Amino acid sequence: MEAALIIVFVAFVLWLGAKILDKAGLHKAWVFCLLIPVVNIIMVWVFAFSHWPNLKPGVKQDL
């Protein structure tokens, strides 16, 4: 029972991450970095401070 809940939770988190990456204009496959310990934390920081291709022109991107 617990294994099924974990699988559902992981699938939900991956789906949310893929939606965010898609809206940012990045490839959805990057979401699999969330499954690798330590890499997931590093990649959240990388995506937070990198240029997002779908950012509208004229919008200031704070870094």
Image (cartoon, helix red, strand yellow):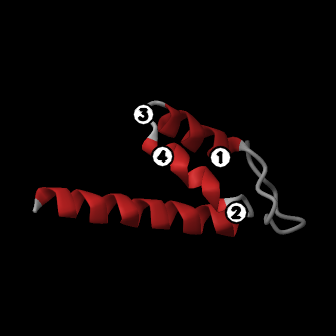
- Ranked by sequence position, the earlier of labels 1 and 2 is 2
- Ranked by sequence position, the earlier of labels 4 and 1 is 4
Q: Is residue 3 above or below residue 12?
A: above
Marks 2, 3: nearer the viewer: 3
Q: How far across and down, in percent of the image, does residue 2 sit?
A: 12, 57
Crowdedness near tag 2: few (<14), some (14–19) or many (≥20) residues, C-alpha within 10 Å: some
Q: Which residue is mark 4?
A: 34
Marks 2, 4: nearer the viewer: 4
Secondary structure beneath label 1 = helix
Secondary structure beneath label 2 = helix
Q: Which residue is mark 2?
A: 24
**Real-space Cα distance between discs 1 and 2?**
9 Å
Q: Nearer the viewer, residue 5 or 56?
A: 5
Secondary structure beneath label 3 = loop
Residue for point 81% across, 56% down = 60
Q: Is residue 13 above or below residue 46?
A: below
**Real-space Cα distance between discs 3 and 4?**
7 Å
Secondary structure beneath label 4 = helix
Q: Are marks 1 and 2 in contact (CB under 8 Å)?
A: yes
Q: Is residue 36 above or below residue 58?
A: above
Q: Are marks 2 and 4 in contact (CB under 8 Å)?
A: no
Q: Which residue is mark 3?
A: 37
Q: How far across and down, in percent of the image, does residue 11 sit?
A: 38, 63
**Real-space Cα distance between discs 4 and 1?**
12 Å
